[in-house]
Amino acid sequence: MFELIFKSYKTNSGKKYVVYLPSKKEMGRCGGEIGPKPNKIIYTKLDYPGRNLEMIKNCDCVIAIGGGLFTFTEIIHAKKDYDKKVCVIDKGNLALWIKSIDKIKKKVFLTKDIKEAINYLKK
């Protein structure tokens, strides 16, 4: 699925694809791979949770199309610690978790429409 998202990003004039990676040891331990060729790779030398925080701290905004618990924690940090704009596609467990916690639900833009999500993040 990530490859489809990346292709759509490039097709729709995406400017720069940056990848934050954990340490090479951590990637090897978890079987991590670099997907489509990024414009820039940032090696954090951290484990995955540390890499996630570093990535969130340095991003402009967050759009979550799906995800699990790590994505959920990234969203919490993005809002609580860094006051980033966050949009979540309203589908699946991630959206259910967001909706179940009022403090987070009030701060995250939920939508089923990807174009609406992008327009929200551009504001």
Image: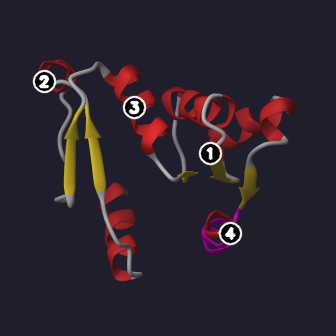
Q: Earlier in the sequence, mark 4 or mark 1?
A: 1
- Which quarter of the figure is the N terminus placed in? bottom left
Please say whether residue 77 is visible from this viewpoint.
yes
Magenta stretch, residue numbers: 112-119
Mark in front: 2 vs 3? 3
Disc on the earlier residue, 3 or 1: 3
Q: Badge 4, how many Cα within 10 Å: few under 14, some, many 20+?
A: few
Look at 31% across and 71% down and name the residue there: 7
Q: Nearer the viewer, residue 22 or 31?
A: 22
Corner quadrant of residue 78: top right
Q: CA distance from mark 4 to mark 2?
A: 39 Å
Q: Earlier in the sequence, mark 4 or mark 3?
A: 3
Mark identifier at residue 84: 1
At horizontal 73% and vertical 37% (from top left) the residue drawn is: 98
Q: Which residue is mark 4?
A: 123
Callout 1 secondary element = loop
Location of residue 33 in the rendering, given as x and y in whole percent from the top left corner: 17, 40
